[in-house]
Amino acid sequence: MKDFSIFIRANLWLVPVIAGLLGLVFYYVAPPPPMSLTISSGFRTGGYDTFAQKLKIELAKQGFALDIINSSGSQQNTERLLDPDSGVHIALLQSGQELGLSDEDRTQLFSLGAMYQEPLWLFLRKGVKINTLADLEKFRVAIGGPNGGTSLIVLPLIQANGIDIDNLGDNWRHYSGPKAAQELLNNELDAVFLMVPPENEFIQKFASNPEVELYSFDRAAAYERHFPFIKGLEVSQGLLSIADDLPKEKTTTLSSKALLVVNESFHPSLTPLILAAAREAMQKGTLLDEPNTWPVEDRNAFPMLDEAEYFYTKGLPLLQRYLPFRIASLADRYIILLFPLLVVMFPLFKVAGPIYRWRIRSRIYRWYKHLRDIDKQLLKSSTPENVEEEIQRLLVMQQDLAKVEVPLAFTHELYELHLHVRFVLQRLKQLQSPPDSAQSIHSDQIL
């Protein structure tokens, strides 16, 4: 323990050096990822809100807080992501939303992938018959709010059917959701476009109403060709309600994808945590999708974060598979940054051994300066001035040497110094003695 204590004290110079290097690392390292986030979803009970609530539950299992703020839909979510003062870091957008953005706006948003399909339902009041969407022009139709995702997909569809969307009449109602559904049941509307998951409680009740009929998009393949963000979707008989056998036969509808999009304020280290939670939320699948099929990567709308690409190709980073997220993210970040520090410190520790030996031996060798000065005078056959004073200094030196601490490995060098001091001391004492006495003293007697 004594040797260890000497070793520590002799290498204390390493402490400020290492502290300085660590200080540089932690000064320049990015701050750790936050443990809370704000997501802009959609209207309450809608598809976006339903998914956000599932995501919140999964993230809470990792101690992560997801704050949900409702919105009118995809367009408002986009506006919030582009507004640096909104406090929103992540949101759900409908595929196709990017077409209405400028190139500059699109470069500020990044995709984490597609989370699920968004089916578009067209419900008609019983007795209303149409062949194509062009026939809707003579009916009262709810096409979704101006800031929502429903109108984003409906407007191009009806425009492709020859309807002038820049001069829509009063029969086109710019809202959707529960309000439009109730008005359809009250005979205040003839048709309603809705975008909600098939398992949603609201649509289950609405679809099972005998006064409502589901429209089949027979030209789905044509729509896919004209609009890349739209896909045809087969709805099997009885999918919406087995008890009521809804739909009565195999039906085709349309769908887009719900994209999870982030802005520049989003901390990229959160990506695997968010996507792992999304995968858990969609693990059981939906009425339309097989289990373990969502989320998937999507590069069509916005550039993907590198961390998202890594997740889809390799899964969770190694540390996050076995450690809580906060610990894993910190460890991963600092291990990567400490690696070059260790590379720098390796040669530092390599020279620490020689420096340590030099510092220990310096405790011994610094005493030789005075002995060497006396020896030089003796070699010149001159008598040192103040012989008595030099003798007293050497006697004091002997007492001080008794207090010098060195490791056991260097003890022999310390005792050699003791012998050398004694030798010089005897020579000085010899100079004080009478010549006859001095000549009778032999070197072996001195030692």
Image: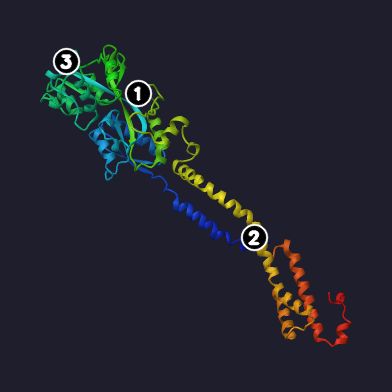
Q: Residue at x 57, y 48 (%)?
A: 343
Element marked by disc 3: loop
Element marked by disc 2: helix
Which residue is tagged 1?
A: 286
Residue at the outermost top position? 249
Which residue is tagged 2?
A: 355
If the image is split into quadrants, where does the C terminus sit? bottom right
Please name whichever residue, 4 or 89, is drawn nearer the observer in this view of the structure. 89
Q: Is residue 156 visible?
A: yes
**Disc 1 or 2, which lies upstream in sequence?**
1
Residue 307 x/y as whole percent: 42, 36
Please name whichever residue, 237 or 297, is drawn nearer the observer in this view of the structure. 297
What's the CA distance linking mark 3 and mark 2?
93 Å
Residue 89 x/y as whole percent: 32, 41
Q: Residue at x 40, y 23 (%)?
A: 291
Which of the two discs, 1 and 2, sits closer to the camera? 2
Which residue is tagged 3?
A: 126
What's the CA distance linking mark 1 and mark 2?
68 Å
**Disc 3 or 2, which lies upstream in sequence?**
3
Q: Residues within 10 Å of mark 2 (few under 14, many from 20)?
A: some
The amino acid at mark 3 is Lys
